[in-house]
């Protein structure tokens, strides 16, 4: 039973390039969450998505960041025109689908983005 | 002031010791509390989950919640070198969906 899958595991981009991070939720899970982890700062919520819907993007920076979870395929976190401050570990989590506060989230291994 | 405060450590203990990890929070809307363990370069994994004040035990792990003091703890008995990891407290609001707020994590090292 495969867990949450993220790819790539490591991504290096130069300033101004685009970064695309992919997340495949656990089988049967229809809710996806993205978090960013900076050194010494813990995990910060970015966005919560269901299939074809963005439910809460209150943690997303207003510019350059976008997320989607299409009907088919993985969820994508897209960062345009990356800057050095975007360097971080980005984690995806999925949950079964009730969306309630008691819905357990399962995390992927993360994508470590380095911006040169 | 951060919504959730957690001592970053590092905390070093000898094998077999009892470990106490703690978090405080300021938002009384938090009603569900979790502890995650994160090994280096890995994603967090859920250890314990509780929503009521009091203690919840699972093997060597005990989670304790004191909502009146806005204080939660995780105790690890008979600590093992394999427990060496960063421990993240996390919490969510009552109702609605699970927008989780994490502490910064405490790095634990258990020395053989």
Image: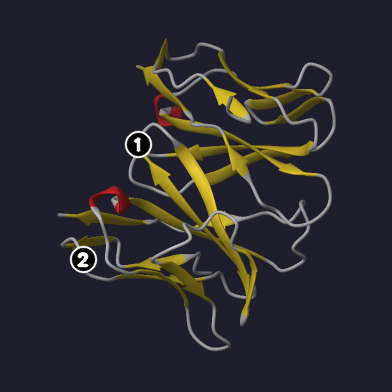
Quarter of the image that includes the C terminus of chain A = bottom left
N-terminal of the two: label 1 or label 2?
2
Q: Residue at x 39, y 56 (%)?
A: A110
- Which residue is identified by label 1? A39
Q: Residue at x 62, y 26 (%)?
A: B60
Q: Residue A108: percent from the left, percent from the top?
A: 46, 58
Residue A41 found in image quarter: top left
Q: Residue B25: percent from the left, percent from the top?
A: 68, 26
Comparing labels 1 and 2, the label whose residue is closer to the camera? 2
The chain containing the residue under callout 2 comes to A
Q: Work out whether residue A69 or residue A105 is closer to the camera in this orientation and state it.
A: A69
Q: Work out whether residue A35 or residue B16 is closer to the camera in this orientation and state it.
A: A35
Q: Residue at x 45, y 55 (%)?
A: A91
- Image mark for residue A16: 2
Position of residue B98 relative to residue A30, above or below, is above
Q: Which residue is most to the front?
A: A63
B52 to the left or right of A99: right
Q: Work out whether residue B87 or residue A52 is closer to the camera in this orientation and state it.
A: A52
Position of residue A11 relative to residue B77, above or below, is below
Asked if residue B50 can be seen in this view, the reply is no
Q: Disc 2 on helix, strand or loop?
A: loop
Q: Residue A44: percent from the left, percent from the top?
A: 51, 46
The chain containing the residue under callout 1 comes to A
Q: How many marks?
A: 2
Q: Residues within 10 Å of mark 2 (few under 14, many from 20)?
A: some
Position of residue A92 relative to residue B19, above or below, is below
CA gap between label 1 and label 2 equals: 22 Å
The reply to whether the C-beta atoms of the residues labelled 1 and 2 are less than 8 Å apart is no
Asked if residue B14 can be seen in this view, the reply is yes
Q: Residue A46: percent from the left, percent from the top?
A: 53, 56
């Amino acid at each position: 039973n495969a867990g949450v899958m993220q790819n790539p595991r490591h991504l290096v981009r130069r300033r101004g390039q685009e970064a695309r991070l992919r997340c495949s939720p656990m089988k049967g899970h229809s809710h996806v969450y993205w978090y960013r982890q900076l050194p010494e700062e813990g995990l910060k919520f970015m966005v919560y998505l269901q299939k074809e819907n963005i439910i809460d993007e209150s943690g997303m920076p207003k510019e350059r960041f976008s997320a989607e979870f299409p009907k088919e395929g993985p969820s994508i976190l897209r960062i345009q025109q990356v800057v050095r401050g975007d360097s971080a570990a980005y984690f995806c989590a999925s949950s079964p689908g009730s969306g309630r506060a008691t819905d357990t989230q399962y995390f992927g291994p993360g994508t470590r983005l380095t911006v040169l | 002031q951060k919504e959730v405060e957690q001592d970053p450590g590092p905390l070093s203990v000898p094998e077999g010791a009892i470990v106490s990890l703690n978090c405080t929070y300021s938002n009384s809307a938090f009603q569900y509390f979790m502890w995650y363990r994160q090994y280096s370069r890995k994603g967090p994994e859920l250890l314990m989950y509780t929503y009521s004040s009091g203690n919840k035990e699972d093997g060597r792990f005990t989670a304790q919640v004191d909502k009146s003091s806005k204080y939660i703890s995780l105790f690890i008995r008979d600590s093992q070198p394999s427990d060496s990891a960063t421990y993240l407290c996390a919490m969510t609001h009552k109702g609605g969906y699970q927008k989780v707020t994490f502490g910064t994590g405490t790095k634990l090292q258990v020395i053989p």
